[in-house]
Image: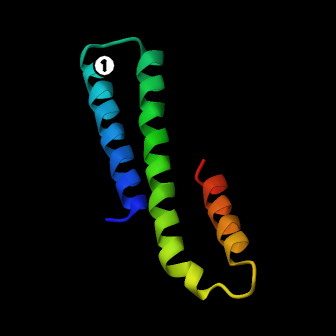
Amino acid sequence: MSNNERKALKLLKTAAQHLRKVLKMVEQRRYYLDIIHESQVVQKYLRMSDEEILSGHLKRCVKKILGGENKDQQFQEMLLIFKKGHR
C-alpha cells in the first residue's frame, strides 16, 4: 500500500467516524446548525481523501508522461487545478 493510499484510508476512516456522529445527532434531533457543521467536517475529510487518491495516481501514472524539465511543476499545477475545482 502506498503512502497516499494509507493517508486516504486514514482520512476515510475519520470521515466514517464523523458520519456516524451525524447520524446519531439527527436521530437525537440535535440543533440543525450543529448537525450541518459536523456534516461539513465529513465532507472535508472526503475531499482530503480524494486529493490523496488523485495525488498518488498522478505521481505513479501521469508524471511519467509529462515531458520537459518541469515535471514536478506541471504535476503541482494539475493537482492545484483539481483542488480548486473540488472545493
Q: Is residue 74 above or below residue 33?
A: below
Q: Regarding mark 1 in the picture, which secondary structure is present there?
A: helix
Kind of residue sitting beneath label 1: Met
Q: Residue at x 44, y 61 (%)?
A: 53
Question: In the figure, 70 relative to 40: above or below?
Answer: below
- Residue 39: quarter of image: top left
List the residue tagged with mark 1.
25
Residue 70 in the image, given as x and y percentages of width and height: 75, 78
Q: Residue at x 67, y 62 (%)?
A: 81
Residue 25 falls in image quadrant: top left
Tell me the crowding category of disc 1: few under 14, some 14 to 19, or many 20 or more residues within 10 angstroms, Cα based.
Answer: some
The answer to which of 36 and 51 lies nearer the viewer is 51
* Image x and y of residue 4, in percent: 43, 60
Q: Is 87 placed left or right of 45 in the picture?
A: right
Q: What is the x, y in percent for residue 19?
A: 32, 33
Residue 14 spot, x, y in % from top left: 34, 38
* Quadrant in the picture for residue 65: bottom right
Q: Residue at x 30, y 13 (%)?
A: 29
24 lies left or right of 36: left
Q: Nearer the viewer, residue 55 or 39?
A: 55
Task: State which quarter of the image contains the N terminus.
Answer: bottom left
In the image, 54 versus 85, the foreground residue is 54
